Amino acid sequence: MSLSMVASSDKEKRESNTVPSGAASVPDLLRVASIYGPNASGKSALIGAMQFAQSAVATSVSFMPQQALAHVPFKLDPESATAPSEFEFTFVIDGTRYQYGFAATSTGFAEEWLLAYKTHRPQLWFERSYDAKTEQNVYKWGPSLTGQREVWRSSTRRNALFLSTAAQLNSAKLLPVYDWIVRKLVIIGAGLQPVSDQSTAWIAEPERKKMLLSFLASADIGISDLDVESRKQHRLNVHIRSDGPEHALSESEVQVPIFTHTCPKGQGKLQYEEESMGTQRLFSFAAPLIESLQIGRTIVVDELDGSLHTHIVRFVVDLFHHRPPAGYEPAQLIFTTHDTALLDADIFRRDQIWLMEKSRDHASTLVPLTDFSPRKNEALERGYLQGRYGAVPMTTSFPLQGQNLGA
């Protein structure tokens, strides 16, 4: 399964919805991609795979020697259930395209590779494979990867990634690759939202608070001011000892946001938990979204429309479609959604819409809308709901009549 942010040759909305890649070997890139599909089609599994791969890069170097990977293969196919799962990121840093990937099982990493494209021709930086007979990793080096390669190799365990190990040991060449995957990519999984900590911390900084208020005002949720309040938090800790459990009460101080609402009849302050789920979600998203737009991050959100009105989701999408001010790097947004009102040619190019469908054997397939060759002025929402592009649930009648549901 592959999701590509490479723009097609379509000239439509090129100024607003695409951005030059900056690399000779890569055409223009899309600023936003939306993924549609029925429940249980695999949308969340796709985001989960991204999270697993990012987490492996970020944390595998700190695993205990025999620690198993949190690898969850496709269990409905006997062959896939025992085979390594492959993950790969392709991205651009300072005009160079990098292609980094690995194959994982629960016991460790079977393969790992990194290619760089300064031109159209790839340069191999390193390639690693696991030899089951010798129980050793076999490496192949490219001339572009300079530094203490043997030190990094000897420090890389079976259940750790070479990229992560070398980055922790300060490989100047590999640190930018590691940083892009770990820090320039923000992934928010299903049913989750960023904790409000980052947005709350911004309230104490005048310039960032001003940006938060401007963001919330633009979304029209009626917040006129933001404050922070210190609150004591109590926690009961239980320690299991040989002579029985020991209970201890700890106290800490946390910062919580306070929202001021102003209307013609007066003013009132609400705590975070008193706000609607939509307001809580939008406030929690505010700082990560603004920061992504400022420093050019790629943010991936499963079910962006959760608790948010269509117009608010469209507002967020429009932020990414506008060209950034001078000095700002272009940012990208990838999200899954069930909001068909966004299937609008006034919002998206046809290559920005992806469809996830489950086959008869329950394997997920991700395809771009362009595979169905919709006309330029086609009513995309109606076509999708009518099943013209697939990726919709096939419901059947439920024979409730005559069923005995009583005690």
Image (cartoon, rainbow, N blue to C red):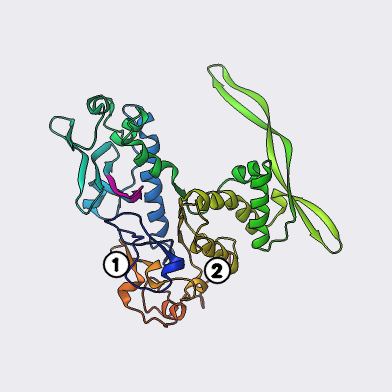
Q: Is residue 178 magenta?
A: no
Q: The residue under label 2 is which amino acid type? A: Leu
Mark 1 to mark 2: distance in Å? 32 Å
Position of the C terminus, as image quadrant, is: bottom right
Seen from this angle, which residue lies furthest front? 326
Q: At 56% across and 16% down in the image, what residue appears?
A: 243
Q: Residues within 10 Å of mark 1 (few under 14, many from 20)?
A: few
> Is residue 353 visible to the viewer in this orientation of the structure?
no
Q: At 69% across and 49% down in the image, what residue appears?
A: 272
Q: Residues within 10 Å of mark 2 (few under 14, many from 20)?
A: few
Residue 196 at what x, y percent from top left?
Answer: 61, 46
Dot 1: element: loop
Residue 335 at what x, y percent from top left?
Answer: 46, 59
Q: Is residue 98 magenta?
A: yes
Seen from this angle, which residue lies furthest left? 133
Mark 2 — residue?
405
Dot 2: element: loop
Label at residue 360: 1
Question: What residue span does the magenta drawing correspond to?
Answer: 91-101
**19 shown above or below 269:** below
Question: Residue 31 vs residue 154: left or right?
Answer: right
Q: The residue under label 1 is which amino acid type? A: Arg
Question: Residue 336 vs residue 99: left or right?
Answer: right
